[in-house]
Image (cartoon, rainbow, N blue to C red):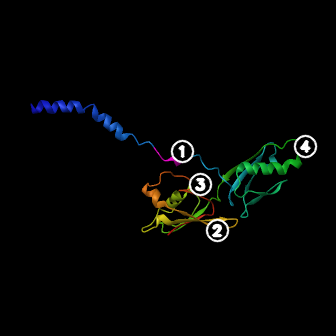
Amino acid sequence: MTTKLFCGLALLLVPIAPALAQQAATPPRATNQAATAPLTPYRINAGDELDIFVWGEERLQRSVRVLPDGTFSFPLVGKVDALNALPSEIEARITKGLESQYRTAVPQVTVSVKAPAGLQFSVLGKVRSPGSFNPGRYVNVLEALSFAGGPADFAQLGNVVIIRKTPTGAQAIRVRLNDIMKGSVSEVNNQTLPLVRGGDTVIVP
């Protein structure tokens, strides 16, 4: 009797086991809204290298590096202000500067970022490998800490500060990473997890 009952239970469990295995192997659906957020358009920093093309004008095709003051010089245009501008905005400024050189419409101007060398930030304080980093792309403050090896022992993640240079002086942006690490933040966005900009200093007390 006992043997028949055991065999019957085993037969019932056979079709259930593969279903449980498949369910365990299926990763949970991501709920982080930041994962589906659009990428932030890249803005030019001092030190970036740009490729500039004026179609049909071989003499106006060149690579330039943005100077520390955020400008660069371009033939027939002169000084171009590039700091914190989108590539499309620089295209418009060069086109405007070339208008006097053409009787008809200015040929299409294309600006692309060849090397985003200016997107450099520093991470200091209680991290495992403090220093300066240049990821070549925008990262948020949590990713910035990962470049520095992550927080060290006794790091106060609830009081992380981003020091940002602005035209009116230094700005302090405080971030509570401990809430994010605990998963107690209902929504992750640029306010709860701000992006790090070129020239920023992230301090972990």
Q: Is residue 49 magenta?
A: no
Q: Where is residue 70 drawn, in percent x and y?
A: 73, 61
Corner quadrant of residue 16: top left
First along the sequence among labels 1 and 2: 1
Corner quadrant of residue 22: top left
x 48%, y 64%: residue: 158
Task: Work out which residue is located at the far left of the displayed protein and give it.
Answer: 1
Q: Where is residue 37 drawn, in percent x and y?
A: 56, 46
Name the residue tied to disc 3.
138
Q: Is residue 31 magenta?
A: yes
Question: Which residue type does callout 2 highlight?
Answer: Ala
Compute the Cα span from label 4 to label 1: 46 Å
Compute the Cα span from label 3 to label 4: 41 Å
Magenta range: 30-36
Name the residue tied to disc 1.
36
First along the sequence among labels 3 and 4: 4
Q: For the residue carrying disc 1, how many other residues have a C-alpha within 10 Å: few (<14), some (14-19), or many (20+)?
A: few
